[in-house]
Image (tube, rainbow, N blue to C red):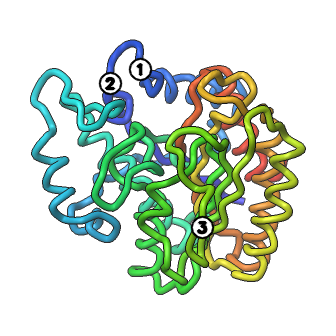
Amino acid sequence: MTLAYISHPQCLLHDMGHHHPEQPARLSAINDRLIASGLDMALHQYDAPLATREQLAMAHDEDYIDSIFAQSPDEGVVWVDGDTAMNAHSLQAALRAAGAVMMGVDLVMQDEASTVFCGVRPPGHHAERDKAMGFCFFNNVALGAHQALRWHGLNRVAIVDFDVHHGNGTEHIVAGDPRILFCSTFQHPFYPNSGAGPCADNVVNAPLAAGAGGAQFREAVEQFWLPRLEAFAPQLIIVSAGFDAHQADDMAGLNLVDSDYAWVTRRLCAQAERSAGGRIVSSLEGGYDLHALARSVEAHLKAFLGD
């Protein structure tokens, strides 16, 4: 199995301030762990390209895209949302993050890789069609799904999201599109306080109560995700890989551990083998305890490699 790793040095330059949890050290911790574990030697590494405005418009309103470009500062920090800011490098980092997922889709569809992990920031799953929020500017996974549908002729793409926060932006963009199945687990009630009400037919939300651990997470995946994925038979699976549901992460109140991320990755791989030729593209979302994040990404990637 060929596992590609897509990132870019510019993703380290986006900085919303020393005390902000979504910090450059997240990627540094992952990279250090990959080297220490020897995993970096098993990865085919690529530099993420810049997403174009035309590509961004597959999932975002053009006026919104223009506003993000216009707000990009030459120096200092500009806040576009209560917890989402741009420095002089943020726009380039956001374009690389979006470009990484679309490149990942191209790689798996062209049989240059079977699975892909995008080690990028800023994350994307809170970005709505016309709104930045929750540390996110562009919705990386939704853009990847549209890349697959528009440019590779697929008819069925699944997006799965195990971040501790509901992927409200992804749901906002894909709800009602029968070509995309969106499956999500998340803590509720919790930021952004969405996902627990009625939803579109192509959305599968499985909220978890604070304190839930691996048993409850696995039960939700088996009860709600897997039957829908089996019936949908996706031709590609895209993962919003947030690791902030880890018990060591004080951002929230779920209690997953490294092995839970390996387990769900193996279940997704099994579905991908049955319906998608093994094709999976995963992109980093949350995860703010640096040690837990690095170990969880290691478990995620090892599961892709069959460990």
Amino acid type of disc 3?
A: Pro
Residue drawn 63% across the image and 27% down it: 35
Amino acid type of disc 2?
A: Met
Task: Kindly check if marks 2 and 1 are in contact, taking CB atoms under 8 A apart as contact.
Answer: yes
Q: Nearer the viewer, residue 22 or 51?
A: 22
Q: Mark 2, residues whose alpha carbon is within 10 Å: few (<14), some, or many (≥20)?
A: many
Residue that mark 3 sits on = 198
Q: Nearer the viewer, residue 142 or 119?
A: 142
Residue that mark 2 sits on = 16
Q: Secondary structure at mark 2?
A: loop
> Which quadrant holds the N terminus?
bottom right
Q: Secondary structure at mark 1?
A: loop
Amino acid type of disc 1?
A: His
Cα gap from disc 2 to disc 1, whole angstroms: 6 Å
Residue drawn 74% across the image and 46% down it: 208
Q: Could you say where residue 285 lies in the image, as x and y percent from the top left?
A: 53, 43
Q: Could you say where residue 269 lies in the image, as x and y percent from the top left?
A: 76, 62
